[in-house]
Image (cartoon, grey):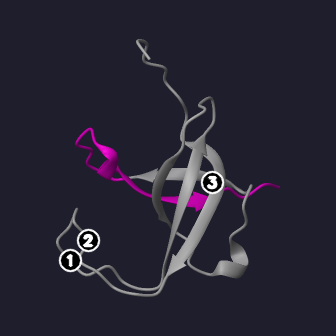
Amino acid sequence: MEEWVEVGPEGTLVAFTVVYFTFLDPMTGRRRPTPYGYGIVRLDGTDRRLQHFLSESDPTKLKVGMRVKAVFAEERKGNLGDILYFEPVERG
């Protein structure tokens, strides 16, 4: 817990939900469109998890264990809000 370790933008979805009720997003002050996906992601190279929005809101397209990657804001501020959402990683 004394050393910073750089990790990449990809990880594994370890849990998720699809939310169907609206609320004011504390980061933007605007109503969050519904439905939206929200998940817990374990980034590669870590043993911790973080909660964040998902690009996918169809529960039939979300799966525990699927690979996801962070999509970042064009203009970054150095906080969690720099990640817009996590999207599924296409494997081919």
Q: Which residue is mark 1?
A: 30
Rendering coords of residue 41 (x, y %): 57, 50
Q: Which residues are magenta?
A: 73-92
Q: Are marks 1 and 2 in contact (CB under 8 Å)?
A: yes
Q: Of 51 and 9, which appears nearest the observer?
A: 51
Task: Measure the alpha-carbon separation of dots 1 and 2.
Answer: 6 Å
Q: Nearer the viewer, residue 16 or 89?
A: 16
Q: Is residue 48 above or below residue 6?
A: below
Q: Quadrant of the N terminus?
A: top left
Q: Is residue 40 magenta?
A: no
- Tell which circle, 1 or 3, labels the residue nearer the N-terminal end: 1
Q: Earlier in the sequence, mark 1 or mark 2?
A: 2
Identify the residue under disc 2: 25
| Closer to us: 21 or 33 | 21
Circle 2 SS class:
loop
Count of numbered labels shown in the rendering? 3
Give the x, y percent position of residue 51.
Answer: 47, 54
**Amino acid type shown at disc 2:** Asp
Q: Could you say which quadrant of the image residue 3 lies in?
A: top left
